[in-house]
Image: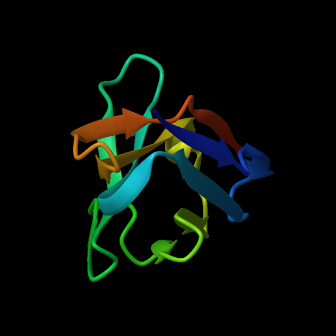
Amino acid sequence: QVQLTESGGGSVKTGGSLRLSCVASGSLFSIYTMAWYRRAPGNQRELVAKTVSGVSTTYADSVKGRFTISRDNNSNTVTLQMNSLKPEDTAVYYCTADVLTFERRTGNYWGQGTQVTVSS
């Protein structure tokens, strides 16, 4: 069993910053991709940023230059530093990871989500 636990959401004004963290725990042998998605009210879920094996990173065009994803393999943690926040960044943010467990099973796991609200 694998769990992803997110923290760091909240409410800020336009231009503010927030830092989201996600810790993976459980029967983890290896973690491949870790990513952040978000879903705004009335919208589909969208990829915000991802890091593959802690080497390559990908960002949505809407967050490039403002958000930074980073990963600590020692603590199985992925963080999303969000700067210059805009009202359109308001959404529930989800952490996800592709893992290989000690039981040699691969799987995609999701956190419970954390609310980010940006007011003008």
Q: Which residue is depicted at the point 35% across and 50% down? A: 102
Q: In the rendered picture of this protein, how many numbered marks are placed on residues?
A: 0
Q: Position of residue 91 (x, y in %)?
A: 53, 35
Q: Position of residue 93 (x, y in %)?
A: 52, 40
In this view, which residue lies farthest toward the bottom?
55
Judged left or right of residue 29, residue 33 is left
Q: Position of residue 92 (x, y in %)?
A: 55, 33
* Visual colour scheme: rainbow
Q: Is residue 45 above or below residue 6?
A: above
Q: Which of these two is toward me, 106 or 58? A: 106
Q: Can I make out residue 89 in this image?
A: yes
In this view, which residue lies farthest toward the top?
42
Q: Which residue is depicted at the point 63% across and 58% down? A: 21
Q: Is residue 5 above or below residue 69?
A: above
Which corner quadrant of the image does residue 59 belong to? bottom left
Q: Can I make out residue 49 in this image?
A: no
Q: Which residue is depicted at the point 59% across and 54% down? A: 23
Q: Which residue is depicted at the point 58% across and 53% down? A: 22
Q: Position of residue 76 (x, y in %)?
A: 52, 64
Q: Which of these two is toward me, 69 or 26? A: 26
Which corner quadrant of the image does residue 85 belong to? bottom right
Q: Which of these two is toward me, 11 or 79? A: 79
Judged left or right of residue 68, residue 97 is left
Q: Is residue 47 above or below residue 33?
A: above
